[in-house]
Amino acid sequence: MTSPLGRALPTVRDRDYLLDRSGVIFKVIGDVHPNSHWLGYVKYYPDARGDRTLFGKTYRQNTIVSKAFGILADRPECYVYSSAIGCVITGVPREDVVLHYSCRNALTTLHKSTDLLDGSPVSEDLLAIVDWIAREGFTDVIGVTGSFLVGVAGPRSDIDLVCYGPRGYEAAEALFTERSLICPYEGENLTRLYLRRARYMAGPSYDMLLRQEARKLQGLTAGAGAHINCEPLCADEDRTFHDVVAREVGQISVLAELTPWSATESYLANLAR
C-alpha cells in the first residue's frame, strides 16, 4: 500500500497515524512507547458499513478510544501493557507498520500538491490555512491530523491541527486570530459547540462547558464554517515525561488550576530539575 501522504518510518510523534498490515489505521497516543509497540487506538478500519474509501476499500471511522478493544478482539497482539500509563492499552506491533502518516509531512505535502484535496469548501479553507502557515514559516511546528492526514476527508470533515512546543503554540495562537481564516465560536454558534461536545461528555452545565472550551484553540473556518481545532503537543526534544512510570491505584478526584502555556512550561521545567 502506498499514499502520497505517507512515508517510511522516521520519528513517530503523538497524533501521527500508522497503517498496519491488516489495513487498520491507528492514531498514535503520546510520545512514550514500549519497544514492541506504538501505542494508539483504531481510527479507521476496513468495514462495509463505513463511509470512507481508502486503497479501493470501504473504511469506517472510530471516534471512541475504548471501542478499539472490541475492533481488535481477534488480534491479541495489539493489546499491550504500558508502564507509562499503568494499564493495558491498544497499540500496533512495530513490525506490522507499513505506512507512517506524519502530521508535519502531511501539511507540507498538501501545500505542494493541492490536487490531493477534493476542491470542497472545507478543503479550500484548509489550503488557505496551510498557505498562511507556510508563508509565516511555521511548517516545522504545525501539522495536519485527522481525516485530512490520511486522505479520507469529505465535504463535512473537520480540520484538525497539532502544534509542537512553545513556538508552535505561539504560531497557532497567531493563526487563530486571523479572522480572514478562522472565526471564533460566538452567538448562536456557541450552542452548536455545546451540542458537539455534550455528545461525548456527561454532566457539565452549558456555562461550565463553554468556559472549558474557551481556552482551546478552536473555531469555525471563514469560508465553509467547518470546525477547526489545534491540539498543543510537546516539542520534539522535550523528554520531561519519558521516564515517568504510572501505577493504577484506584479512582481519585482532582481539582486543578488551568494555566497558560508559559506558566505550565515553567512548572514542568522546575519538576525536571
Image (spheres, rainbow, N blue to C red):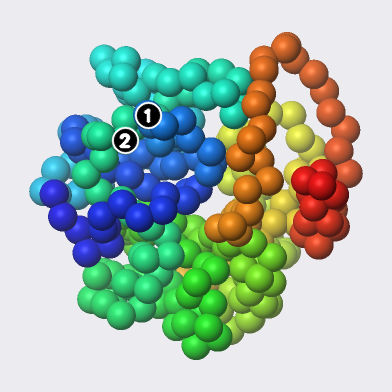
Q: Secondary structure at mark 2?
A: helix
Is the C-beta separation of discs 2 and 1 under 8 Å?
yes
Which of the 4 image quarters holds residue 202? Answer: top right
Above or below: residue 118 compared with residue 52 = below
* Residue 179 position in % (x across, y down): 64, 81
* Residue 181 position in % (x across, y down): 55, 79
Above or below: residue 160 compared with residue 79 = below
Above or below: residue 33 compared with residue 273 = above
Please tell me which residue lies in front, 91 or 269. 269
Can residue 219 be spotted in the picture?
A: no
Left or right? Give the position of 171 relative to 23: right
Specify which label sits upstream in the sequence, 2 or 1: 1
Which of the 4 image quarters holds residue 131? Answer: bottom left
Write down the residue under mark 1.
36
Write down the residue under mark 2.
94
* Residue 1 position in % (x across, y down): 13, 49
Q: Secondary structure at mark 1?
A: loop
Which of the 4 image quarters holds residue 217? Answer: bottom right
User: Please, what is the three-letter code of the amino acid marked with disc 1?
Assistant: Ser
Left or right? Give the position of 31 relative to 123: right
Residue at (32% x, 58% y) in the render: 154
* Residue 118 position in % (x across, y down): 26, 69
Above or below: residue 23 compared with residue 143 = above
Can residue 11 be spotted in the picture?
A: yes
Residue at (14% x, 43% y) in the render: 57
Q: Residues within 10 Å of mark 1 (few under 14, many from 20)?
A: few
Disc 2 to disc 1, C-alpha distance:
6 Å
